[in-house]
Amino acid sequence: MTAAPDIAFKNPGRRAVVAWGFFDWAAQPFFTLITTFVFAPYFASALADNPTEGQSLWGYATAAAGLGIAFLAPILGSVADATGRRKVWIFCFSIPFVICCWAFWYAAPGNPNAVMIALVAFAIGTLSIEIATVFNNAMMPKLVPSTHIGRLSSFGWALGYASGLVTLVLVLGFLAANPDTGRTLLGFTPLFGLDAATYEGDRASGPFSAIWYLIFALPMFLFVPDAPSVGKIGAAVSKGLTDLQHSLRHARQNRNIFLFLIANMVFKDGLVALFAFGGIYAAGQLGWGSIQIGTFGIILTITGTLGLLLSGKVDDRFGPKIVIAFSLIVLMICGLGMISVDRTTVFFFIQTPAAPEGALFASLPEQIFITLGAIIGAVSGPLQASCRSLLIQLAPKELMTQYFGLLALSGKVTSFLAPLAVAIVTATADSQPAGMSVILIFFAAGLVLLMMVKEKRAGQ
């Protein structure tokens, strides 16, 4: 198998690079506000019959979106490479994404179709923004030299973290209010006359995400140069599938890289489920509303940023494999600790008083949950960043671009399995902790596979 030729690079300027990064800034509120910390807990606690059913239904929707992504992302990624044009595809998938974000507003308590509206909007919205991201990522080689791809990726990732933090503060501080007090996290009455009793602030996170995306994705459309069309879609799909088949065959011939890609696939599935269900689990087990869960999200975003800042030096000194293994062990320990907590229990059997009425994180279970969650946030970013570092150590230099494509594919191709497993176990056992415990199995299996990987480049 011969290496693909490097894409010719012509410097498009700093404005194009910054505009590209703002796509992550534009898209992030969907993942922060809808998927995890605001709308998902509202769905489980206010729309579903009970949090356990809510966790199960949200899992099925997450799995459906993941299955669609697994099927479409490799094909459409190849289409992007073979046809050249990316922005027209981003525009096409942005349309259903924005519509789905707006639809969350109509998933109101008392609406007989609210559950179906929420689940369909979430599944299609997730599929749309993930596929749009595939095409946005495909523009990276045209923006910076190949030696700066990692820095460009980190730049976009950092903007996404910042956007998540900013939008959480805005929604919690000015839109979403406690139904009992009618006040937001900052003590204000919600803007625009939003009614806390009918969760209008929580539902407004959908239209808010749509407007945020429309504003901040615009620079990418205006200032990032698109490649000229170089091929037809039909031929591109055929070529893309052929290239994918060749890349997979080459990876299977190198057991070391293949093991790492499988390990990455398994523990990334666990991460997808962890972030999809974290807010729902807190709503059901601790009775948290949007204020508490959103504050929890702010804490996780901060610790995640700090973890990324500190992990780079550890990665350079001790190697990425140690960082990944340590992160997985921490995720399992903290995950086990979190499923041992409910409103009056810690570590499965230690009974504690319930939280005083109206107090924020005043009980021991809440404080333990917050602490464990903060630690999870701190290791999740380094886990994903060090996967990129380890691939650079393992893959042949002349095939690096193709292997980064396989790394992305391995993180998506089975992203429906863990959410589906959580949904099935939750529904079967009628228990949120039982469902969440499945995630620990994915982390453990990924760790076992990782330990079989040797930090040695192919061909050495």
Image (cartoon, grey):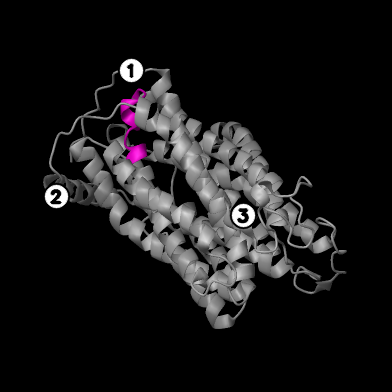
Marks 3/2: CA distance? 40 Å
Which sits earlier in the primary sequence, circle 1 or circle 3? 1
Relative to 85, residue 30 above or below: below
Answer left or right for 426 relative to 236.
Answer: right
Q: Which residue bears the numbered disc 1?
A: 11
Residue at left 51%, top 69%?
Answer: 114
Type of the residue with mark 2? Ser
- Residue extending furthest toward the front: 193
Magenta extent: 135-145
User: Where is residue 367 drawn, in percent x and y?
Assistant: 79, 56
Question: What crowding class fits label 1: few (fewer than 14 Cα within 10 Å), some (14-19), or many (20 or more)?
Answer: few
Type of the residue with mark 3? Phe
Q: Which secondary structure lies at badge 3? A: helix
Relative to 291, residue 119 above or below: below
Specify the label residue 238 is tagged with: 2
Please name which of the two marks, 1 or 3, marks the residue nearer to the observer: 3
Question: Is residue 21 something that shows in the picture?
Answer: yes
Question: What crowding class fits label 3: few (fewer than 14 Cα within 10 Å), some (14-19), or many (20 or more)?
Answer: many
Q: In the depicted view, which residue is nearer to us: 287 or 450?
A: 287
Residue 212 on the magenta span: no
Q: Quadrant of the N terminus?
A: top left
Marks 1/3: CA distance? 39 Å
Residue at left 61%, top 33%?
Answer: 309
Residue at left 74%, top 54%?
Answer: 370
Q: In which quarter of the image is the C terminus?
A: top left
Q: Which residue bears the numbered disc 3?
A: 37
Which sits earlier in the primary sequence, circle 1 or circle 2? 1
Specify the label residue 152 is tagged with: none
Type of the residue with mark 1? Asn
